[in-house]
Image (tube, rainbow, N blue to C red):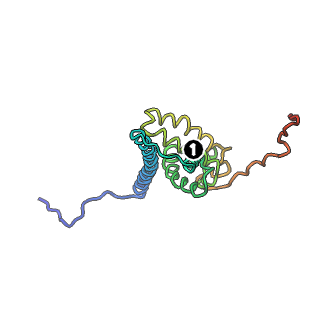
Amino acid sequence: MSLSNPDDPPGRQTVTDETVAEWRATLAALQAKRDSLAVVTDRLAEDFAEDFDEEDDDLLDIEEPFSEADGDAEAEAEGTSLTILAFDDDAFAEEIRTMTPWVDHILLGAFGAEITSGRPWCVRWPEHDEAVARMYHCWLAWQELTDSRSGATGPSVWQRDHLEPLLLKLRSPDGPFGACTTNPDHPHHRLLPHPPHTDPTSLPVPGEPRTSV
């Protein structure tokens, strides 16, 4: 009968670099999902609070006095743009920080194919206005259509109507990343020049006949 030394450590699985990389990827994905769900939860909580306040006022039949300031605030809220390029600098920066885990671990982690000459990418994507606008709108749609209240077809609708058009334009050779990285071993970043502004002499003048070619 053999006796084991109680001081001997139990056998442990060998931890390799690949194992550590898998752990880190799993952790990053979980953190991204947590952050994205937190955003959705906060927005749902805000919607619930607004709905509850409205129902509560109806039940109690309370009519609050309407002031001019309330009207201005309501008009301002109704006129708020969902286009991120219209945000001020602070709001823009906050939205980009919130969206980045989704970009890295969901958009690219699940749907981003390998970087090639036909599928360029740029790790400095926040500096490309067109890319930011397209990705942000897709992210908003993802939050809405992957919510359980969107039904079982919501995620499929998101992939068909939002994700696939985004990737086709975003990672096409003539897209916003056309002058950026086409080989993952040689990262590159360059902003494409914008077309010249409209020639003011071409604008139609009221009362004068329009000229066209």
How crowded pointer 1 is (Cα within 10 Å; few <14, some 14-19, many 20+) is rated as: few
Camera-side residue of 201 and 50: 50
User: Is residue 4 depicted above or below 49 in this figure?
Assistant: below
The residue drawn where x is 44% and y is 41% is 54
Residue 74 at least partly seen: yes
Query: Measured from the top left, where is residue 60 in percent x and y?
Result: 39, 41
Residue 150 left/right relative to 195: left
From the image, tell me which residue sits under label 1. Answer: 78
Please name the amino acid that badge 1 sits on: Glu
Q: Extreme bottom residue here?
A: 7
The N terminus lies in which quarter of the figure? bottom left
Query: Measured from the top left, where is residue 153 in percent x and y?
Result: 46, 32
Residue 157 left/right relative to 48: right
Camera-side residue of 209 and 188: 209
Quarter of the image for residue 151 reads top left
Quarter of the image for residue 58 reads top left
Number of callouts in the render?
A: 1
Residue 182 at least partly seen: no
Residue 177 left/right relative to 2: right
As helix, strand or loop, the secondary structure at mark 1 comes to: helix
Camera-side residue of 211 and 169: 211
The C terminus lies in which quarter of the figure? top right
The residue drawn where x is 43% and y is 33% is 152
Quarter of the image for residue 204 reads top right
Residue 175 left/right relative to 109: right
The residue drawn where x is 84% and y is 38% is 206
